[in-house]
Image: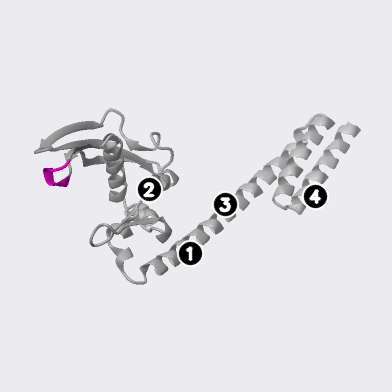
């Protein structure tokens, strides 16, 4: 397996998935955590089963600097890719409470600090595996990159769709050959007609008219054999 296989699968970010924070200078580009988690689920599997923080590894610590209270999160993140398990440490920190307006304001408490710091650590962990790497490498700041990456992603999706179509066709072909052979084992006419109904329904659904004819011929032949017996 190529060391870059996973990275190359997840590094490209469609421009329509990018959020731009114009309040910062320069403007900061990012991708929503929900999108990263969705992409991780597509690649690895179910969250908590095939990827995520290792149970029992999560730790929350608090510290204070002046009037600012910080919440720190550490954990071990695991993932399963190509049948192999990997894991590495993740961490993040966030302001849980702080005084606004340079100390002249009020104490602001972030009631969602625990959720935010955990999510921040997970998304940073995914970025270390290559997820949305083109954002963090600054490629989306370059003129013409959005048009380029859109065409690359479209090409990848077309190629994947073609591969999926070929795979489905191969699986269907194997299924049909196997099911056609089963007619010789049916002992009653009812069993033959019941099986034939299901086979024809599936063949018709994908437009396999030749398959419908083959299943019907197999049905008629077996019914004739049963009747003669």
- Residue at numbered disc 4: 213
**Could you classify mark 3 by the number of other residues whose Cα lies within 10 Å: few (under 14), some (14-19), or many (20 or more)?**
few
Q: Is residue 102 magenta?
A: yes
* Camera-nearest residue between 181 and 170: 170
Dots 3, 4 in contact, CB < 8 A:
no
Residue at 27% across / 57% down in the picture?
A: 23
- Residue at numbered disc 3: 167
Q: Which residues are magenta?
A: 101-105
Dots 3, 2 in contact, CB < 8 A:
no
**Could you classify mark 4 by the number of other residues whose Cα lies within 10 Å: few (under 14), some (14-19), or many (20 or more)?**
few
Number of the front mark, 3 or 2: 2
- Residue at numbered disc 2: 36
Pick whichever of labels 2 and 1 is earlier in the sequence: 2
Marker disc for residue 155: 1
Number of the front mark, 1 or 3: 1
Q: Position of residue 98 (x, y in %)?
A: 17, 39
Q: Is residue 188 above or below residue 150?
A: above
Dots 2, 1 in contact, CB < 8 A:
no
* Camera-nearest residue between 172 and 134: 134
Query: Marks 2 and 4, Cα distance to the nearest angstrom?
Result: 47 Å
Query: Marks 1 and 3, Cα distance to the nearest angstrom?
Result: 18 Å
Q: Position of residue 185 (x, y in %)?
A: 75, 33
Pick whichever of labels 4 and 1 is earlier in the sequence: 1
**Could you classify mark 1 by the number of other residues whose Cα lies within 10 Å: few (under 14), some (14-19), or many (20 or more)?**
few
Q: Is residue 80 magenta?
A: no
Marker disc for residue 122: none
Q: Is residue 126 above or below residue 12?
A: above
Instruction: Say which element carries label 3.
Output: helix
Pick whichever of labels 3 and 4 is earlier in the sequence: 3
Quarter of the image with the C terminus in it: top right
């Amino acid at each position: 397996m190529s060391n870059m296989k996973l990275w190359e699968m997840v590094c490209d970010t469609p421009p329509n998935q990018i959020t731009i924070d114009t309040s910062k200078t320069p403007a900061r580009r990012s991708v929503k955590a929900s999108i990263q988690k969705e992409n991780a689920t597509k690649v690895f599997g179910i969250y908590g089963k095939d990827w995520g923080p290792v149970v029992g590894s999560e730790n929350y610590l608090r510290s204070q600097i002046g009037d600012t209270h910080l919440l720190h999160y550490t954990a071990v993140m695991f993932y399963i890719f190509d049948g192999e398990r990997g894991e590495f440490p993740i961490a993040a920190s966030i302001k849980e409470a702080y005084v606004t307006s340079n100390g002249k304001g009020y104490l602001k408490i972030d009631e969602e600090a625990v959720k935010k710091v955990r999510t921040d650590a997970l998304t940073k962990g995914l970025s270390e595996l290559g997820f949305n790497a083109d954002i963090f490498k600054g490629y989306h700041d370059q003129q013409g990159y959005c048009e380029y990456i859109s065409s690359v992603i479209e090409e990848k999706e077309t190629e994947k769709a073609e591969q999926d179509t070929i795979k489905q066709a191969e699986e269907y072909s194997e299924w049909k050959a196997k099911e056609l052979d089963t007619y010789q084992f049916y002992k009653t006419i009812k069993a033959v007609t019941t099986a034939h109904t299901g086979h024809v329904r599936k063949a018709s659904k994908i437009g396999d008219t030749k398959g419908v004819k083959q299943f019907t011929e197999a049905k008629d032949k077996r019914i004739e054999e049963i009747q003669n017996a």
